[in-house]
Image: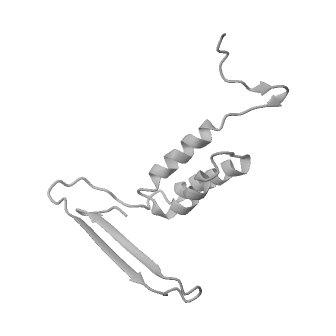
Amino acid sequence: MKDLGDFHYFLGVHATHPREYRSIVGALQYLTLTHPDISYVVSVVSQLMHAPRTTHMHSMKRIFRYLQGTITHGLFLSASSSNSTMVFYSDADWAGCPDSRRSTTEFTVILGSNLIS
């Protein structure tokens, strides 16, 4: 048996591999560490990895255009070995949402002088 590499046509049907989509979504997931504002949309496009379509690729291109426009925004992480304490702040408001009467929760994690989450 001989390996002929990746196939492009099979029985007259054009075949593509979604590997590029998966690697881009993986890179976007790492990027959410410093850009938490894209967390929701990255979670949505990562749910579509089993069957990506061209509209999903257009959605990822739109995410990249947004990131290009907000290149100076995000969380700044600096290396400081003098203070490595971790501080957590949290707040819960039971039935705080005026529309749905659901509870809302916020939290902040700070390591040294860096905002982590």
| Front residue of this view, candidates 46 and 31 | 46
Taking the spot 66% from the left edge, 11% from the top edge, the residue there is: 2
Q: Position of residue 61 (x, y in %)?
A: 63, 50
Q: Give the vertical position of 14 relative to 115 (above or below).
A: above
How did the renderer colour the structure? one colour
| Quarter holding residue 42 | bottom right
Where, quadrant-wise, is the C terminus in this rendering?
A: bottom left
Q: Position of residue 10 (x, y in %)?
A: 79, 26
107 with respect to 79 (left or right):
right
Q: Give the vertical position of 100 relative to 7 (above or below).
A: below
Q: Position of residue 91 (x, y in %)?
A: 37, 80
| Front residue of this view, candidates 6 and 28 | 6
| Front residue of this view, candidates 41 and 75 | 41
Taking the spot 46% from the left edge, 52% from the top edge, the residue there is: 31
| Front residue of this view, candidates 93 and 110 | 93
83 with respect to 36 (left or right):
left
Q: How many marks?
A: 0
Q: Give the vertical position of 81 relative to 104 (above or below).
A: above
Q: Position of residue 70 (x, y in %)?
A: 50, 60
Where, quadrant-wise, is the N terminus in this rendering?
A: top right
Taking the spot 64% from the left edge, 51% from the top edge, the residue there is: 48
| Quarter holding residue 34 | bottom left
Taking the spot 69% from the left edge, 45% from the top edge, the residue there is: 51
